[in-house]
């Protein structure tokens, strides 16, 4: 099967003093928008449900402890004991006692290994649940360690082209994406300084952590100029490797849906470069060691942007060609592939080609007996759609990083905001209408405004033509 490779270099973004308050607490920031008109009727959180869960956890802990202790006294291998200990960890986690929960999850995992062996899949549920507590404690590195270990267990137990390995690959890639956004977009206190100095590059190139050796390398000219590898984020490079390795495992058993999804993920990965450039544009700050430097020029070059665009375009064209080559494919699937290409072009400001792809998408659906009114309605969501659709965006479920495992999602507050979207997908006229107050509300409001300004949105589509949207009044519930 034909495969596609990610060729575009991907970069980290730049830090800014505007993102400097209580950042560790916000690395798990998650926005959930709803129209203000129905916000009061939207039950996004029920304190009653949360209170019931906490009461149930409190009541269950003594009973669980009693059963665990009784089983331990028998001194016999008991697979059910793994579940008991894990359930105790869940109860502690519900009460916010995350350090204790982590001890129990580790105990359950260790017992699963004792009973089933080193590569036992039975330890995975405890490992996965522990991720939520590590997230609550802002232990990003610990989550990465767990996610990589879970992936390694699945590599050991499943064939490379199995459905289980596809799931394992996507789960790990999604975590790397989440960690990348948490550290580089939300958590200023942990953000790595990616603006490499000449001395830092010298240390990396010659493998010596010494000032004198670095200065000697600079003096004798053995330090190269800035290149892409000096600023690339390791998490994004790992995602690239995962996708390439998975593509190499393709066999005749690989489904169309898998091939299409991996290609779209490659486009998503390419789009990170455009997002970083946009974020720097909106959070530009003066740094005498960076502003005007060769690194700034490389990071924000048109060549970099073109490579980002071309890589994603190749991936999405591959998707469209693959779908079109399949007999009896649905018109909706082909139209969606055209919409992805249209959104991709519009996100990069290529409005002429975007308009053409939107028209083609409409025509595909018309040929399948859909009328324009029904197509318009299907593509007119009440919440604006950031484009490209296949991309990940900060502070969304895609970048929550394991929070989806939680059965109960609470929200700390909300921000009401209005803005308009023009026919090219740009947001403007941003006005804050009101909000709840907490210690991070100003910081959260600044982040929300930044994300709205840096994103592109699909405009109103009518008969395949782009039109500006009327003012959107939205309530963004948030949690962190």
Image (cartoon, grey):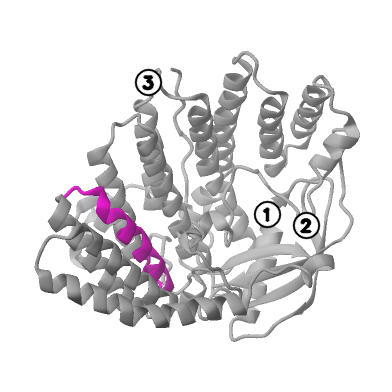
Q: CA distance from mark 1 to mark 3?
A: 37 Å
Q: Which residues are magenta?
A: 118-141
> Residue at (34%, 65%) from the top-left corner?
130
Element under label 1? loop
Front disc: 1 or 3: 3
Q: Earlier in the sequence, mark 3 or mark 2?
A: 3
Q: Earlier in the sequence, mark 1 or mark 3?
A: 3
Front disc: 3 or 2: 3
Q: CA distance from mark 2 to mark 1?
A: 8 Å
Image quadrant assignment for residue 242:
top left
Which mark is drawn over residue 73?
none
> Residue at (72%, 24%) from the top-left corner?
331
Q: Quadrant of the C terminus?
A: bottom right
Task: Examine the rendered structure and indicate whether residue 131 appears above or below residue 69.
Answer: above
Is 60 or 21 nearer to us in this picture? 60
- Residue 219 in view: no
Task: Examine the rendered structure and indicate whether residue 443 appears above or below residue 311.
Answer: below
Which mark is drawn over residue 455?
1
Task: Examine the rendered structure and indicate whether residue 430 appears above or below residue 24.
Answer: above
Residue under pointer 2: 427
Is 121 or 253 nearer to us in this picture? 121
| Mark 2 Cα shell of 10 Å, populated few (<14), some (14-19), many (≥20) | many
Q: Is residue 473 left or right of residue 256?
A: right
Q: Is residue 152 left or right of residue 306?
A: left
The answer to whether mark 2 and mark 1 are in CB contact below 8 A is yes
Is 228 or 75 nearer to us in this picture? 75
């Amino acid at each position: 099967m034909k495969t596609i490779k990610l060729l575009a270099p991907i970069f980290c973004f730049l830090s800014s003093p505007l993102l400097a308050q209580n950042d560790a607490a916000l690395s798990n920031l998650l926005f959930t928008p709803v129209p203000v008109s129905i916000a009061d009727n939207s039950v996004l959180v029920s304190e009653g449900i949360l209170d019931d869960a906490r009461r149930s956890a409190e009541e269950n802990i003594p009973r669980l402890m009693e059963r665990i202790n009784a089983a331990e006294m028998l001194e016999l291998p008991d697979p059910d004991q793994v579940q008991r200990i894990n359930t105790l960890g869940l109860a502690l986690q519900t009460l916010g006692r995350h350090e204790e929960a982590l001890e129990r999850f580790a105990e359950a995992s260790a017992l699963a290994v004792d009973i089933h062996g080193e590569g036992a899949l039975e330890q995975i549920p405890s490992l996965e649940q522990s991720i939520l507590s590590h997230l609550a404690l802002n232990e990003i590195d610990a989550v990465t360690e767990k996610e990589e270990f879970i992936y390694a267990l699945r590599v050991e137990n499943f064939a490379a082209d199995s459905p289980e390995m596809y799931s394992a690959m996507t789960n790990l890639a999604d975590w790397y994406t989440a960690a990348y956004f948490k550290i580089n977009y939300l958590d200023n206190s942990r953000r790595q300084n990616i603006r490499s100095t000449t001395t830092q590059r010298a240390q990396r190139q010659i493998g010596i952590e010494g000032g004198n050796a670095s200065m000697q390398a600079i003096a004798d000219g053995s330090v190269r100029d800035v290149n892409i590898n000096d600023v690339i984020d390791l998490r994004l490079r790992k995602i690239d490797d995962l996708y390439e390795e998975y593509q190499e495992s393709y066999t005749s058993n690989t489904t169309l849906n898998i091939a299409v999804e991996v290609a779209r993920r490659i486009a998503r990965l390419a789009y990170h470069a455009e997002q970083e450039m946009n974020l720097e544009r909106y959070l530009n700050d003066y740094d005498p060691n960076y502003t005007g430097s060769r690194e700034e020029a490389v990071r924000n070059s048109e060549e970099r942007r073109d490579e980002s665009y071309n890589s994603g375009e190749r991936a999405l064209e591959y998707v469209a060609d693959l779908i079109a080559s399949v007999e009896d494919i649905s018109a909706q699937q082909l139209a969606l592939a055209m919409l992805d290409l249209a959104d991709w072009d519009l996100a990069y400001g290529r409005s002429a080609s975007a308009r053409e792809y939107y028209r083609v998408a409409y025509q595909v659906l018309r040929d399948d007996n859909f009328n324009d009114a029904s197509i318009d309605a299907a593509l007119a969501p009440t919440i604006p759609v950031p484009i490209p659709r296949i991309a990940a965006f900060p502070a969304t479920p895609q970048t929550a990083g394991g929070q989806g495992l939680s059965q109960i999602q609470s929200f700390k507050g909300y921000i009401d905001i209005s803005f308009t979207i023009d026919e090219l997908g740009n947001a403007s006229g941003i006005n804050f209408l009101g909000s709840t107050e907490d210690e991070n509300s100003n910081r959260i409001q600044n982040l929300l405004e930044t994300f709205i300004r840096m994103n592109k949105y699909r405009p109103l589509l009518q008969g395949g033509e782009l039109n500006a949207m009327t003012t959107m009044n939205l309530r963004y519930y948030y949690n962190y």
